[in-house]
Image (spheres, helix red, strand yellow):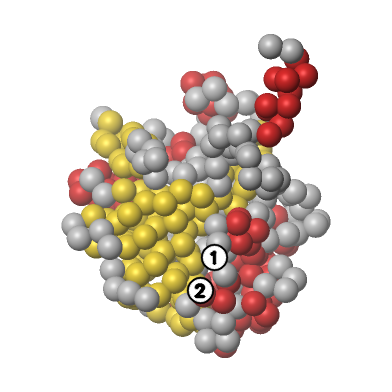
């Protein structure tokens, strides 16, 4: 076969491997960015907001550098920096369309062009922002709220959109404490400014809860604390199936090394206790797990592995 013919085939082949014969342009992205998981009668859609390149020290700033380097090497990851996944979730239950977290949005001062893809990818999935009835925020870090601060987004949302967030989280960001975090320069200021702006713009739509709140049939948000004082997880349950969106309670390294401290944790010791408790719960029940910074689509289960844990990704359902 001639080289020119091969090139033409590659240029006209879609990400599904089927040559486009409809006259429509080829997709812009060849990497999947959404994945559907049925939980009983509830539809859960995991959407990638892109990736966030960060120094590897952010994974475990309390770990011995040699141990951290060994883990990265075992995982075939680069030693200095790698891409953190950014995942959000859309849930349809009982006539409600619920968005869990809103992605990074765009902060030109941080130079993160491969993140902040959520709004565009929702549109690509055929989801109109005006159809979203509820927004659940696991916490108010900018990679979970920034998508709603993108120009033009607020005008496309429902006026009666309900935004569910823990009271402790809103209170914390009135005067946030970064004493125990280990973030790259610029991040504390950006986090503080983004949270302040978000509360100012959306404060009237906040539906605050103390410890636990049912957002819709089978969709319950529960405060865990740790990562931030109001950090929360969301459990979706229907027909004997269940899935927990863990937000930032679990990172890829947290299965094998649950006591390693992440640089974004405002209370690292409490975050480790929350992580271990949650992983034990999920290992016991066998329920599915999705988390913001696990590799897309991040759907899997948890197994006990000695004194630590093991992540068991699900087989993709085509």
Identify which residue is drawn at 58% across, 86% down: 159
Q: Nearer the viewer, mark 1 or mark 2?
A: 1
Most foreground residue, 210 or 29: 29
How far across and down, in percent of the image, does residue 211 sit? 35, 73
Q: CA distance from mark 1 to mark 2?
A: 9 Å
Q: Is residue 289 visible?
A: yes
**Lateral position of residue 295 relative to residue 185, left or right:** left
Identify which residue is drawn at 60% across, 78% down: 157
Local secondary structure at mark 1: loop
Most foreground residue, 40 or 220: 40
How far across and down, in percent of the image, does residue 221 sit? 37, 68
**Lateral position of residue 14 relative to residue 312, left or right:** right
Local secondary structure at mark 2: loop
Contact between labelled residues 2 and 1, with CB atoms less than 8 Å apart = yes
The residue wearing badge 2 is: 132
How far across and down, in percent of the image, does residue 305 sit? 28, 31
Identify which residue is drawn at 77% across, 19% down: 4
Q: Is residue 57 visible?
A: no
Instruction: Decide: is 116 above or below 170.
Output: above
Within 10 Å of disc 2 (Cα), the crowding (few <14, some 14-19, many 20+) is many
Instruction: Decide: is 261 above or below 210.
Output: above
Identify the disc placed on residue 127. Answer: 1
How far across and down, in percent of the image, does residue 310 sit? 33, 34
């Amino acid at each position: 076969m001639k080289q020119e013919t091969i090139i033409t085939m590659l240029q006209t082949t879609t990400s599904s491997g089927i040559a486009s014969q409809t006259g429509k342009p080829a997709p812009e992205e060849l990497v999947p960015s959404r994945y559907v998981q049925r939980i009983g009668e509830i539809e859960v859609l995991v959407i990638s907001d892109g990736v966030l390149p960060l120094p590897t020290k952010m994974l475990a700033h309390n770990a011995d550098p040699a141990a951290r380097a060994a883990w990265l090497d075992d995982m075939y990851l680069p030693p200095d920096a790698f891409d953190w996944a950014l995942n959000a979730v859309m849930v349809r239950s009982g006539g409600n369309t619920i968005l869990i977290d809103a992605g990074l949005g765009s902060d030109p001062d941080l130079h993160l062009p491969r993140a902040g893809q959520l709004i565009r990818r929702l549109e690509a999935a055929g989801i109109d922002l005006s159809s979203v009835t509820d927004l659940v925020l696991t916490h108010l870090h900018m990679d979970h709220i920034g998508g709603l601060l993108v120009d033009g987004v607020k005008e496309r949302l429902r006026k009666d959109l309900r935004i569910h967030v823990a009271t402790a989280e809103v209170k914390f960001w009135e005067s946030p404490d970064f004493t125990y975090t280990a973030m790259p320069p610029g991040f504390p200021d950006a986090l503080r400014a983004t949270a302040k702006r978000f509360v100012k713009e959306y404060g009237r739509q906040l539906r605050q809860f103390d410890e636990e709140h049912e957002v819709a049939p089978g969709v319950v948000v529960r405060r865990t604390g740790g990562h931030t004082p109001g950090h929360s997880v969301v459990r979706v349950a229907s027909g004997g199936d269940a899935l927990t969106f863990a937000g930032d309670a679990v990172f890829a390294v947290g299965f094998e090394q649950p006591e390693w401290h992440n640089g974004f944790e405002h209370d690292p010791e409490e975050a480790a206790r929350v992580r271990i408790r949650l992983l034990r719960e999920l290992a016991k029940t066998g329920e599915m797990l999705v988390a913001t910074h696990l590799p897309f689509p991040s759907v899997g289960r948890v197994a006990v592995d000695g004194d630590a844990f093991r992540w068991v990704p699900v087989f993709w359902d085509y």
